[in-house]
Image (tube, rainbow, N blue to C red):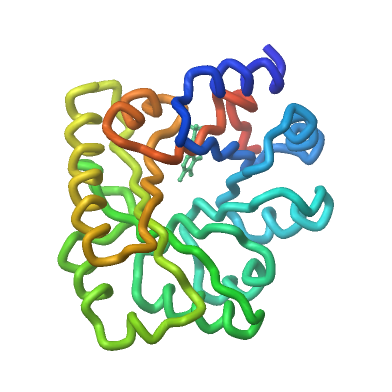
């Protein structure tokens, strides 16, 4: 299967209103170009250095999404161009993004990453930490970030009931968030293995890598 035909298959299965982020981490420029030629304009990467190299080489109408864990000292490298940061999991990180966005005279859209997986290993905030951020004195003063929604990763499992439970939990938090934060309209949940379930549970943005580009080789 080609990248183009994989993309076409996936696009056909997405309802209107669900954005496809093509997760191109570890993949060569030639693969991204193939997806670009097939009309894809939103790409997700999980390392800032790799994303910046690709940003420099590829056309400027691409939206670059940072989907991985972000180290604060690297925010400055993506601040000039990043379209959406999915993995904001601390107030300190949000502050740093605000600071670097200000230096670049722009507003950077951010998703707060929630911990929804029943397994221990994934990053993310719990609801107490989320509310601490939203209710803090500083939050309304941060003029160079916009919280545009939430992101979450479910447990890596084929147990459909568990996946649904975790996605439902995130959707509930999202619905509550929207009462407080009018700019929140994105619910980023679902990957190659679970995106159909995520969409049924209310996802508006899916992050799909291996079903488009094939399995990743980390060596
Ligand atoms: C790698 C990655 C994806 C894509 O995973 P696939 O299973 O290849 O679709 C999605 N979201 C995040 C946060 C990732 O790190």
Query: Eyeballing the image, is 159 above or below 109?
Result: above
Q: Residue at x 46, y 81 (%)?
A: 143
Q: Residue at x 36, y 58 (%)?
A: 184
Q: Quadrant of the C terminus?
A: top right
Q: Quadrant of residue 111?
A: bottom left
Percent position of residue 118, x then y: 19, 42
- Number of numbered callouts drawn: 0
Front residue of 92/6: it is 6
Percent position of residue 22, x then y: 59, 37
Q: Quadrant of residue 129?
A: bottom left
Front residue of 33/37: it is 37
Task: Give the farthest residue toward the top.
Answer: 1
Query: Eyeballing the image, is 66 above or below 3?
Result: below
Percent position of residue 163, x then y: 24, 30
Q: Quadrant of residue 43?
A: top right
Q: Is residue 195 left or right of residue 59?
A: left
Q: Quadrant of the N terminus?
A: top right
Percent position of residue 171, x then y: 24, 44
Q: Residue at x 45, y 69 (%)?
A: 146
Front residue of 38/128: it is 38
Q: Is residue 17 left or right of residue 161?
A: right
Query: Eyeballing the image, is 95 above or below 36?
Result: below
Query: Eyeballing the image, is 114 above or below 217?
Result: below
Q: Residue at x 23, y 22 (%)?
A: 159
């Amino acid at each position: 299967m080609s990248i183009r035909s994989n993309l076409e298959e996936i696009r056909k299965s997405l309802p209107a209103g669900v954005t496809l982020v093509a997760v191109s981490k570890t993949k060569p420029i030639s693969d991204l170009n193939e997806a670009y030629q097939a009309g894809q304009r939103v790409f997700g990467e999980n390392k800032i250095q790799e994303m910046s190299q690709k940003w420099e080489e590829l056309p400027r109408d691409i939206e670059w999404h940072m989907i991985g864990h972000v180290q604060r000292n690297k925010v400055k490298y993506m601040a000039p161009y990043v379209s959406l940061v999915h993995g904001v999991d601390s107030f300190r990180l949000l502050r740093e993004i605000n600071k670097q966005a200000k230096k670049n005279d722009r507003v950077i859209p951010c998703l707060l990453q929630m911990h929804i997986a029943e397994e221990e290993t994934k990053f993310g905030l719990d609801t107490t930490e989320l509310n601490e951020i939203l209710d803090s004195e500083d939050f309304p003063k941060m003029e160079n970030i916009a919280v545009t929604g939430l992101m979450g990763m479910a447990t890596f499992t084929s147990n459909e009931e568990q996946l649904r439970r975790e996605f439902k939990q995130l959707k509930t938090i999202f619905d509550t968030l929207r009462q407080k934060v009018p700019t929140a309209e994105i619910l980023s949940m679902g990957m190659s293995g679970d995106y159909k379930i995520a969409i049924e549970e209310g996802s508006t943005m899916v992050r799909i890598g291996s079903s488009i580009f094939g399995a990743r080789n980390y060596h």
